[in-house]
Amino acid sequence: MTTTADTSPESTTEIGPRPANWVSARIDKTTDSLDRAFDEGLTGHVITGRDGKVVELEDGSSAIEFVSCSYLGLEAHPALVGAAEDALRRFGAHFSSSRNRMRPMYLGQLEALLSEIYGGRPVVPFTSVSNVHLGVLPLLGNGTLPGYPVSAKGPVFLVEKTAHASIQVLRGVMEQLGPVRRFDLADPESLATRVKEATAQGRTPIALVDGVGSMGGLIDVVGLARTLGEADGLLYVDDAHGISIEGRHGAGYAYEAFGGRLPDHVLIAGSLSKGFGGAGGFAVLGSAEDVRVLRKFANPLVFGHSIMLPLLAADVAAAELHLGGEVARLQDRLWANAAVFDELTEGRLVSAGQHSPIRGAHFGTEAAAFEAARRLRSAGVLVLPAFFPTVEKGTGLIRFALSATHEKSHLETAVDALGPITA
């Protein structure tokens, strides 16, 4: 279950002096819940140190955190820390240059290792997943990437309702290349209808979805790819939360869902900043020709710097751990913790029983979610309380990001404090 609200301008009307657009729609519909959560100390925590999943707070207290999306705990691995320290001594904190002008040695090493993880597919690192979207989607929609042909009449971008905000925010960019339509996976006919509309116009349907939902749930990427493939369309998967948690080498949820063989009409955008343990994002592409086009025309690559050097070195170390078997061991611990958490919560939470590291306690009212967040905070448990537009208006969700490094006592403390979930 992924529960991002619909804030598309086509479903809103002008309110006040602002013109009707998605920014106005979001602002006008959003309550003061996030402000109140900050004011009450339920989110926005300032940490001064940590030991595993226990963090020190600025007031001197400590708490168990279920907020970080480092699902395997790799960022604290001695190999990553040592690599970052060595790079810091060699190069300093940063080398400010476009990668087309000067490439740190770690960049080529990372590209080669990521390619090995993805079965020989070329992989291009970016400074963030958001920059992957910004660099790839305009070229994809323009038909510029050789491996992903687009009709002469152009594309129709089909954005799934719950796709991450980093995709949704690029609507204006995408609309310069073709129409943008939304579809809802909760409606079985929604995508098929949109695909038929696109093909009737002679346009190429390009569907944009998450792999693992940021608030929970797994997207059926295989079924979506089949639907798009039958219409000569393309599927773009933002699998930021799925990277590293599945597969012998940690290729991630979406890649492994395809049996470790990515269809030619599917692209994956991944994160190096969550389960992977480092920092940045990447795109898995079809050919070296696609890579050459990206390096020449993708704005974040042409005009932006590389991943900060110490973290780029840490990414290389993390990739080596993926290929060396350490990640597979940590995956086992993650899924064991998820099974314990599901048992303790009697399978009541969003994503229970799924190979997602995210669990969500969904409440029918914001007030009930606030009460749960207060109980958890009082018990020394930090979580992510989510309200509109992350979830449907008037409701609330408490997100637990599970990790291989959580101890059973951490899980028990959180479940005891959570209490009942009210509709």
Image (spheres, helix red, strand yellow):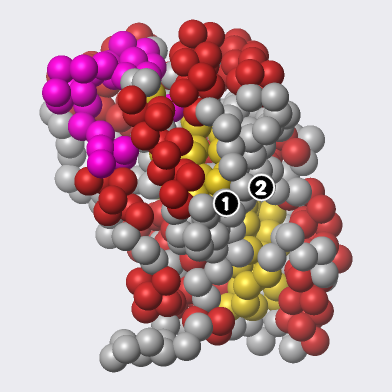
> Which label's residue is closer to the chain start, 1 or 2?
2
Residue nearest the observer in this picture, 140 or 9: 9
Determine if the magenta segment contains residue 57.
yes
Q: Amino acid at mark 2?
A: Met
Q: Position of residue 365 (x, y in %)?
A: 51, 53
Residue at (37, 13) in percent of width and height: 52
Q: Is residue 111 left or right of residue 54?
A: right
Residue at (44, 19) in percent of width and height: 73
Q: Which residue is mark 2?
A: 1
Q: In the rendering, which numbered label is found on residue 364?
A: 1
**Does the CB distance between marks 1 and 2 fall below 8 Å?**
no
Q: Position of residue 245 (x, y in %)?
A: 60, 27
Secondary structure of the residue carrying tag 1 is loop
Q: Position of residue 284 (x, y in %)?
A: 58, 46
Would you place residue 261 above or below residue 417 in this image?
A: below
Stretch of the chain drawn in magenta: 40-68
Secondary structure of the residue carrying tag 2 is loop
Q: Is residue 121 left or right of residue 64?
A: right
Residue at (55, 46) in percent of width and height: 363
- C-alpha distance separating marks 1 and 2: 15 Å
Q: Amino acid at mark 1?
A: Gly
Residue at (48, 45) in percent of width and height: 368
